[in-house]
Image (cartoon, rainbow, N blue to C red):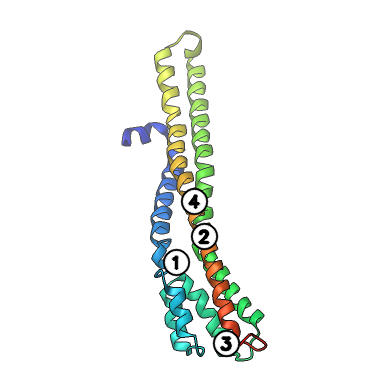
Amino acid sequence: MLSIIQAAGWPIWPLILCSILALAFIIERFIKLKSSRILGSSNLLDEAIGISRNSVPTPDIAAQLAENCALGEVLAAGWRALNQNPHSTPGDVRAAMQAAGRSVAHQMERYLPALGTIASAAPLLGLLGTVIGMIEIFGSQASTGALSGGNPTMLAHGISTALYNTAFGLIVAIPSLIFWRYFRARVDGYTLALELAAERFARHLERFCAGGRQ
């Protein structure tokens, strides 16, 4: 492997850096996008509704819920809005939960743009390395006159070496693209689940809002 890297030349080093970054992003997103970190327990929403069935919980309980998971952070935003202003309207509560939801969505999408950029740029970096290698090969062959009389074996070996960059670029890009699509789908699914849960919880909190249903 080291001999291939040395033969491919300096253009392969940006690809190696991209591969390290892509692996780090993939591992980090696998950890951060676990279902338990985003949605918590399967009955978290029902538990939050049960706790606030008769009154709005205290800020301490809201803080504990927010620390539970991303869904807890969104639900706790509704409690906080009512704790800060008991005369909040249903629109105010929904606005607070939507703001928390946008923050959570931003956190879920962290590093995904970078992973997508690596998936798009790696083949181009590989192609650039191959083009540079080909220019160097043909330039050296022309200066020695090998193109007219020369050694086709040496020329073929030089071309195959230059193609290492393209191959390595594809090796980096394909897994990066697959995992980017996978994480993108997971984030979209979590976002939908959060929106549905937040809407149900907002309807539940309307009884405590000014002008809300009793």
How far across and down, in percent of the image, does residue 90 sit? 64, 81
Query: Residue 38 lies in what quarter of the image?
Result: bottom left
Residue at the disc numbered 4: 115
**What label does residue 38 carry, if any?**
1
Q: Are marks 3 and 1 in contact (CB under 8 Å)?
A: no
Label 3 neighbourhood size at 10 Å, few (<14), some (14-19), many (20+)? Answer: many
In the image as oriented, which residue stretches furthest toward the top? 149
Q: What residue type is labelled 1?
A: Ile
Q: Residue at x 43, y 61 (%)?
A: 33
Vertical position of residue 95 compared to residue 56: above or below: above
Helix, strand or loop at label 4? It is helix
Q: Earlier in the sequence, mark 2 or mark 4?
A: 2
Residue at the disc numbered 2: 109
Q: Nearer the viewer, mark 3 or mark 2?
A: 3
Helix, strand or loop at label 3? It is helix
Helix, strand or loop at label 1? It is helix
Q: Which of marks 1 and 2 is nearer the N terminus?
A: 1
Q: What residue type is labelled 3?
A: Leu
Location of the N terminus by quadrant is: top left
Q: Which of marks 3 and 1 is nearer the N terminus?
A: 1
Q: Which residue is drawn at 57% across and 75% down?
A: 97
Q: Are marks 3 and 2 in contact (CB under 8 Å)?
A: no
Q: Which residue is drawn at 47% across and 70% down?
A: 70
**What label does residue 82 carry, if any?**
3
Tell me if I can see residue 10 in this picture: no
Query: Residue 16 lies in what quarter of the image?
Result: top left
Vertical position of residue 73 compared to residue 128: above or below: below
Q: Which amino acid does label 2 sit on?
A: Glu
Q: Which of marks 1 and 2 is in front?
A: 1
Measure how far apart labels 3 and 4 are at the Cα level: 39 Å
Q: Which of marks 1 and 4 is nearer the N terminus?
A: 1
